[in-house]
Image: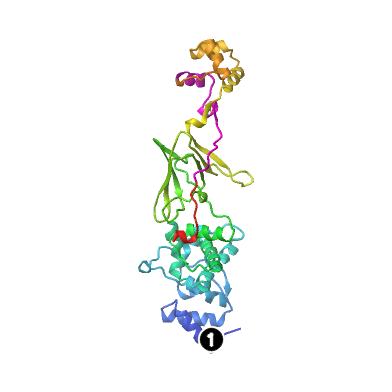
Amino acid sequence: MTIGTDEQQELTTLVREYIYEQDKVEKLVDYLYRHEIVGLEVFAYLGFDKIDKLMFQPVSRDTFIRRAPFYFHKPSRELGDIAELSQYIYYSLEFNKPDYNNQLENFYCVLERLYYDFGIDIVTILNYTVKQRGRVGEIQPIYNWLHYLELAQKLGIEEKTPTRFIVEYNIVREMVGLEPIIYEIQEMYVGDFIERYGNRLRMDGIFPCDHNNQPILKWIGVRIKNAKRIWVDVNDKLKGSLYVEITPRTKVWGLNVYGADEDASDIWYDLYTGPLLMEFDYTVIKDRRVTIGMTQKQLAEAVGASDRTLQKWERGETTPDGHFLLRLMNVLDIKELSEITKIHDVDEEYNHVTVNDYQSLK
């Protein structure tokens, strides 16, 4: 079915919003006049070579017209463009998966909702989450943004592009009873997630903060007990470092830093334990000695201690000092200090920073 003359004139007016060359306007209107299904060949027909099969699948004429703002948008640094449509598609969609076409269709549907339902301009759609995250081409933040807008609309919140999106998004999620997004700390070096400088610990990542720039720990993948002070040094994207001023009883755990459980459930891993929470595990000495087939006398001679002293160590009556402890670890083939210590339970409350209410963050 072709379109009528009046519709053709309306189509010409619409196309001119996105294509400025008169000859291309006429060619596109002519193409759409003759086709109900628009294929990839339309871009070659118009002389555009930046659209390929990864960015476009055949769609109906009406769908093509709705999506024309995205197909023909030309990024401009003067307009504040730092991202392009192709970057989202090439960097985030899994083109080698059987459901790629569905992924692409879902993405375009999200773009349409942002543009038509929420009245957000193309430049903002393509660039807002990039400026918030500091990364180009991530699609999930755009999906989160649409979800935020849907929730905010129900709650009567008018702000469409909050300055600190990750904070505002978690607030509205909690307001409607949804679980907040937890931001896990990042690996600093291979296998290391925490670094110590004297009485301070440092962790890197994205750290949601309140209006006083205090970290909202319930939204961060760390648990901290008995710290003297906790603060952050972050940029406008809330990316940076979390610092902990420790005490002898400080304890720190990290969420899923070495991976989640086999069933995808969360695991909290020990990252730091203060010295007053650690106790020498005297049972290890006897267990290791028996395992390797040594007598008390042989072990005492090997580490340069008396038989009586070794007996007291094995009964837990005394604790070997640093000199003897290192010798024991060497003779008994104990690689890590954690193998010869046990950790006390921490009874004190977690250090916790809360958000009072939505308005407190304004």
**Magenta-tinted stretch:** 323-351
In this rendering, position of residue 105 left or right of residue 160: right
Which is more toward the observer, 12 or 212? 212
> In the image, is 284 to the left or to the right of 305?
right
Q: Name the residue located 36 percent from the left edge and 66 percent from the top edge.
A: 77
> Is residue 341 inside the magenta stretch?
yes
Q: In which quarter of the image is the C terminus?
A: bottom left
| Above or below for 83 versus 232 | below
Q: Is residue 329 located in the magenta-colored stretch of the structure?
A: yes
Front residue (pair 97, 220): 220
Q: What residue type is labelled 1?
A: Glu
Q: Say which of 183 and 313 sits in front.
A: 313
Q: Circle 1 — which element?
A: helix
- Residue at point 43%, 68% (across, down): 123
Q: Which residue lies furthest to the right in this view?
A: 263
Neighbours of disc 1 within 10 Å: few (<14), some (14-19), many (20+): few
Residue under the point 51% across and 51% down: 219
Quadrant for the N terminus in the image: bottom right
Q: Position of residue 152 (x, y in %)?
A: 53, 66
Q: Mark 1 points at which residue?
A: 7
